[in-house]
Amino acid sequence: MFFAVALLFLLGMLVSLYALRRDFIKRQRVEARLKAQVALRKAMENSVTIGLRAWDMNGRILYVNQAFCRMIGFEATALVGHSAPLPYWPKEREDELQLIHRHVTMQGTESSGVEIQF
């Protein structure tokens, strides 16, 4: 009886090990695909000359690309996490840009987008 119970537990452990191995291999494949997609996106993003930035619903900067940083003369680390008024805004246009920024964060942009020169 003891031998049968021990054999049953051993069989259960082997099935569990097989399931873990299968899940581990699947995870490795998914990670490899994700890394390839991230590398492709990063390569495409670094090749564009258009400045891109992303912010959250509160208007706080989440991300800027290198083209945007080159255009305004700031490093990404100096911009991420900031909200309006943003450090690269000219002081003389701060009120106008604040209105535009508030409008975009509250209502979004039209299909044509918003173009602002700094």
Image: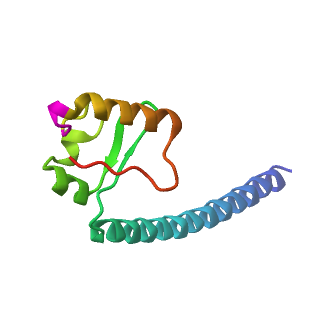
For image coordinates 16% across by 31% down, the residue present is 92
Q: Is residue 113 left or right of residue 15?
A: left
> Residue 113 in the image: x percent, y percent?
44, 53
**2 left or right of 67 in image:** right
> Residue 29, image x and y in percent?
53, 70
Relative to 23, residue 80 above or below:
above
Residue situated furthest left in the rendering: 73
x%, y% of residue 83?
A: 31, 31
* Nearer to us in this view, 104 or 39: 104
Q: Which residues fall within the magenta stretch?
A: 88-92
Residue 39, quarter of picture = bottom left
Q: Main secondary structure of the magenta part?
A: loop
Q: How is the image coloured?
A: rainbow
Q: Is residue 28 magenta?
A: no
Q: Residue at x 37, y 35 (%)?
A: 101
Q: Residue at x 23, y 58 (%)?
A: 66
Residue 96 seen = yes
